[in-house]
Image (cartoon, grey):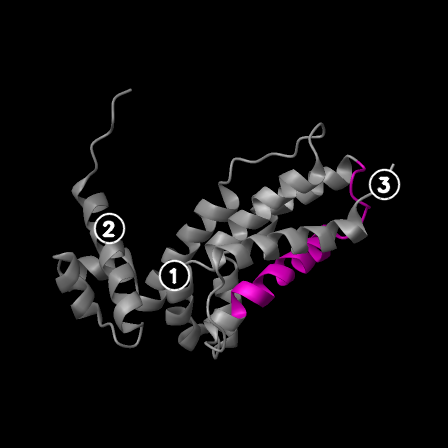
């Protein structure tokens, strides 16, 4: 397979994103100017603006990329012949690894100061993270359709499981009042969250 050579524009965009990731994690959104981003990426400020209209759009794009790679593009499809717990555990572990990761948490903190106090922009930002396209949402939908999980509102079921995870390994760390979980704690959280979810939704035949 012939690998397509990247254009100058694509290379500059990648340089901007790499510079933004490093700058936001170190200085935060407010501490990072477009001039600083341009210098770090070795491009002109005009080039930065040609790709991204503002810093907030940049940090949102970085978060969206991480979300898509870890939650949407996960190559896990519902398997009617495999055990529910094993399949669901794999998906929940992927989410825990994402939301508790240093990079995702750091970028979330960088974005929080801007979006959490701007309701209209926060609502717009959330459209970048559609839950119905995630591997976990697709899996729950397929398991319900197969009769292995009780029929219910899929969005409610997804959010219940999502909240079990983020209530322990994302929000406390984002707000800074709890330290990150150890590997063992993450494993236990995944196991207990899946067991709680299946205790209510799994259909025993």
* Residue highlighted by disc 1: 102
| Mark in the foreground, 1 or 2 | 1
Q: Secondary structure at mark 2?
A: helix
Using a 10 Å C-alpha cutoff, classify the residue at mark 1 as few (fewer than 14 neighbours), some (14 to 19) or many (20 or more). few
Q: Nearer the viewer, residue 175 or 50?
A: 175
Residue 88 percent across, percent down from the top left: 64, 43
Q: Secondary structure at mark 1?
A: helix
Residue 42, by quadrant, is bottom left
Residue 130: in sight, yes or no? no
* Residue highlighted by disc 3: 204
- In magenta, the rendered stretch is 147-171
Precedes in sequence: disc 1 or disc 2:
2
Residue 58 percent across, percent down from the top left: 33, 61
Q: In the rendered view, does 142 fall on the left or right side of 76?
A: right
Residue 21: in sight, yes or no? yes
Residue drawn at (49%, 41%), measured in percent from left and top?
73
Q: CA distance from mark 1 to mark 2?
A: 23 Å
Q: Nearer the viewer, residue 114 or 185?
A: 185
Q: In the rendered structure, does residue 148 fall within the stretch colored magenta?
A: yes
Total numbered labels placed on residues in the image = 3
Residue lying at the far top in this picture: please name it. Answer: 1
Using a 10 Å C-alpha cutoff, classify the residue at mark 3 as few (fewer than 14 neighbours), some (14 to 19) or many (20 or more). few
Residue 75 percent across, percent down from the top left: 52, 35
Residue drawn at (38%, 61%), measured in percent from left and top?
102
The quarter of the picture where the N terminus appears is top left
Residue drawn at (51%, 65%), measured in percent from left and top?
170
Q: CA distance from mark 3 to mark 2?
A: 51 Å
Q: In the rendered structure, does residue 176 fall within the stretch colored magenta?
A: no
């Amino acid at each position: 397979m012939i690998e397509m050579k990247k254009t100058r524009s694509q290379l500059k965009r990648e340089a901007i994103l790499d510079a933004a990731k490093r700058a936001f994690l170190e200085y935060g959104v407010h501490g990072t100017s477009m001039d600083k981003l341009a210098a770090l990426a070795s491009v002109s400020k005009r080039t930065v603006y040609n790709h991204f209209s503002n810093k907030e759009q940049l940090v949102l794009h970085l978060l969206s990329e991480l979300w898509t790679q870890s939650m949407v593009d996960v190559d896990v499809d519902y398997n009617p012949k495999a055990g529910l717990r094993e399949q669901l555990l794999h998906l929940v572990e992927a989410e825990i690894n994402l939301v508790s990761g240093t990079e995702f948490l750091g970028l979330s903190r960088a974005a929080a100061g801007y979006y959490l106090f701007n309701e209209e922009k926060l609502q717009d930002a959330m459209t970048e993270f559609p839950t119905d396209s995630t591997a976990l949402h697709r899996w729950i939908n397929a398991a319900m359709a197969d009769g292995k999980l009780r029929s219910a509102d899929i969005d409610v079921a997804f959010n219940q499981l999502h909240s079990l995870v983020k209530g322990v390994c994302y929000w406390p760390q984002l707000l800074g009042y709890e330290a990150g979980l150890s590997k063992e704690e993450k494993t236990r959280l995944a196991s207990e969250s899946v067991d709680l979810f299946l205790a209510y939704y799994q259909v025993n035949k």
